[in-house]
Image (tube, rainbow, N blue to C red):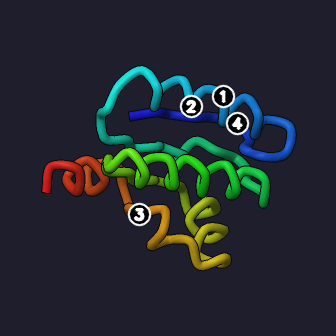
Amino acid sequence: MINFTGQLDAYSEKQFTTYINEVLASNQLSVVIDLSNIDFIDSCGLGAMVQAAKKCTESKRSFNVVGNPRVTQTIKLVRLEEYLHLAPDLSTAIGKLSA
């Protein structure tokens, strides 16, 4: 599980992407990205999430995202909830990995 706080936007997207790529390169485990403590996500942040999901799909590993109401609303607004495997809470996301 990877937990982020603050904002996921144009200013933090590069840092986010670098970190995610390092984690993905270091193991072959399934991924749960916890965005429930993110205050704000913009199109750059969403783009970074899509790239992370794409890399997980390419490496045949499970990928789930958990968000707070604001993050969830933004993801649903652009209709990425299925692609990002949006889960309503952390226990559901972890449960999906073992299913």
Name the kind of residue labelled 2 in the image: Asn
Residue found at the far front of this picture? 58
Among numbered discs 1 and 3, the one appearing first in the sequence: 1
Query: Mark 1 near mark 2, Cβ–Cβ under 8 Å?
Result: yes
Name the kind of residue labelled 3 in the image: His
Residue topped by disc 2: 21
**Mark in the foreground, 2 or 3:** 2
Residue topped by disc 4: 6
User: x%, y% of residue 57?
Assistant: 41, 54
Q: CA distance from mark 1 to mark 3?
A: 21 Å
**Mark in the foreground, 1 or 3:** 1
Q: Quadrant of the C terminus?
A: bottom left
Residue 41 versus residue 22: which sits nearer the camera? Answer: 22
Q: Give me the residue at 45% from left, 73% from top.
A: 82
Q: CA distance from mark 1 to mark 2?
A: 5 Å
Residue 46 occupies quadrant:
bottom right
Q: CA distance from mark 4 to mark 1?
A: 16 Å
Residue topped by disc 3: 85
